Image (cartoon, grey):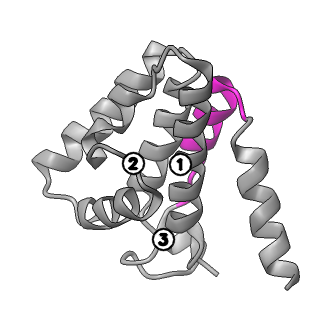
Amino acid sequence: MKARLVAENRSKSLAFIDGNGCEILADSIPDADEMGVDEEIWQPEYIAYLAFAMGCSDDMPALCDRALEIHSRAVAQSARWFGRCAEDVEAVGFAGQCEDLSRAASVADYEQRQAFRRRLVSMYHRATEFAG
């Protein structure tokens, strides 16, 4: 129960991290060895992609570019996290595909942007919940 409350609080607070916080978060994601978990479970590139997309939603184009760089690199390397991202996109009800996250982040309408950010928080939670 305590772990669930911590996870819920983490998800709620993540929705309000500003773009600079998202950048710090994305640049600080430990690798699977540091986490002591299998690479199939902990995918730092995917988690960083989500964090940069969140920062992008705070009107920070440089973070949009970093998210797109991660995505392009993942496409070139046929990254395993694409399948996970597709599942998460569907699970949270995002209208687009994984590669659309950084493009959809700059929604002009405040309510739509907040709804988008809440979906990203849910995706971030799904991406990190099995790590321990």
Work out how far the residue at label 2 is from the one at label 3, CA to CA, in angstroms.
27 Å
Q: Locate residue 17, reporting x and y percent.
A: 72, 34
Q: How far from the left and from the top, in percent, is residue 12?
A: 76, 51
Looking at the image, how many numbered discs can be counted on the residues? 3
Identify the residue position indicated by label 1 in the image: 119
Looking at this view, is 96 or 84 the one in front?
96
The image position of residue 40, as x and y in percent, is 36, 78
Asked if the stretch drawn in magenta spans residue 23, the answer is yes
| Above or below, comparing residue 66 to residue 96 in the picture | above
Residue 127 visible somewhere in the drawing: yes
Q: Could you tell me if residue 27 is visible in this image?
A: no
- The residue singled out by tag 3 in the image is 32
User: Helix, strand, or loop for circle 3?
Assistant: helix
Front disc: 2 or 3: 2
Q: In the picture provided, is 113 more to the left or to the right than 5?
A: left
Marking on residue 94: 2
**Relative depth, front residue between 12 and 49:** 12
Tell me the kind of residue under disc 1: Arg
| Side of 18 relative to 110 (left or right) | right
User: Image point 50% across, 14% down: which residue?
Assistant: 108
Report x, y in % for residue 46.
Answer: 40, 54
Name the secondary structure under disc 1: helix
Question: Which residue type does callout 3 highlight?
Answer: Ala
Q: Quadrant of residue 114?
A: top right
Marks 1 and 2, Cα distance to the nearest angstrom?
7 Å
Q: CA distance from mark 3 to mark 1?
A: 24 Å
Residue at 15 percent of width and 47 percent of height: 75
Marks 1/2 in contact by CB < 8 Å: the verdict is yes
